[in-house]
Image: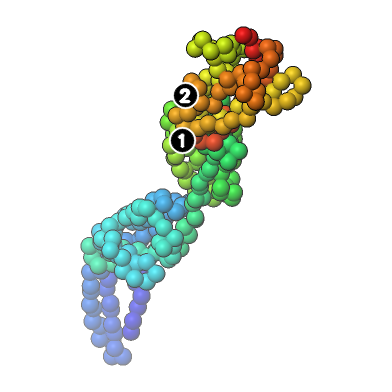
Amino acid sequence: MIKNVDPNYQGIYFLVGENDLGCIDTQSINVLVNPWPEVDLKIDDTICEGGTLNLIANSLNGVNYSWYFNNNLTPFSNQQSPSINPVGIINQGNYKVVANSNKNCFDSSSIFVFVNSKPKVDYSWNQDGCKTSTNLPIVFNSSYNSANSYWYEINNLQASNFKSFSHIFKESGTYQIKLGAISEMGCKDSIIKDVEVIDYPRCWLPTAFTPNNNILNDFYKPVCVNVKRYNLCVFDRWGGKHLDVTVEGDDVYNPILGAWDGNINEEYAPIGVYIAIVIAEDELCNTVTYKMSFTLVR
């Protein structure tokens, strides 16, 4: 005869037997109930790609643990609460922990872990197809379109909470621009890029010049800084063009090259008012246009 015993009660159990002649015999046994290592497996609510997966096994009486991933024994067995960092999509699947007590009693718990993809952010910037320079609005635009929220930082200072934003740098230098994004599931990603900002191309146009061959102020030429190339056109008051010249590189800063000598068809131009238009370009292909009326004096 087999009798199940309530495991919540331990102690001495007696068995009394009697035959059909009334003879009685008694046997006893001391039943010791070992604690059951009840185990409960938990994880964080949201697991994000690139983050940390904390496998938490709660057990009062467990002393040894074995971990299985998709029914395969894992390298981190014997740990009660192991972690995987960084976690990837490859780590998505079913996890099971088996807890053993010091009396070789065991219990198990399992859970399916879903790894959410992080928003793989990136961004670009332009200025009409160019790079960056001072005093021009630079537009930063995220190439990742599926985030729930975005933010930009310039040198660790909050700059925008939008997917795209425009900024004007007042000073030249190298700036760290950070774009961060949070997905619908709360997963974060960010990227930092160094953005080099150069000074805006600038030119100053004289208001008069005296082409009388005395070496002083004989040529009409813009004075430029941070300019790679410029085009200078000179017109009279009636719109007639008398000069159209382009110089680049070191010639931009040569006092004679790319200048007007005050002659028209190798003859002295009449004294009077003329108009100069300069289109200057820097090394990043940013352009600026200047227009100035000036007087030719002899």
> Can I make out residue 235 in this image?
yes
Residue 150 position within the rendered picture, expressed as x and y whole percent measured from the top left: 55, 40
- Left or right: 41 in relation to 158: left
* 63 sits to left or right of 255: left
Q: Amino acid at mark 2?
A: Asn
Q: Is residue 149 above or below residue 31?
A: above
SS at mark 1 in the image: strand
The colouring scheme, among rainbow, by chain, secondary structure or one colour, is rainbow
Question: Furthest-right residue in view?
Answer: 238
Percent coordinates x, y for residue 116 in the rendering = 49, 55
Spot occupied by residue 19 in the image (x, y as percentages of width and height): 29, 88
Is 33 on the left or on the right of 203, as rendered?
A: left
The residue that appears at 56% across and 47% down in the rendered structure is 143
Q: Nearer the viewer, residue 146 or 173?
A: 173
Q: Looking at the rendering, which quadrant does residue 25 occupy?
A: bottom left
Residue found 41% across the figure and 63% down from its top: 90
Can residue 110 be seen here? no
Any mark on residue 195, and which? 1
Q: Which residue is mark 2?
A: 254
Q: Position of residue 38 (x, y in %)?
A: 35, 61
SS under mark 2:
loop
Which quadrant: the N terminus? bottom left
**How many numbered badges does the structure rendering display?**
2
Residue 292 or residue 187, whichever sits in front: 292
Q: Is residue 169 above or below residue 19?
A: above
- Work out which quarter of the rendered image holds the C terminus and state it: top right
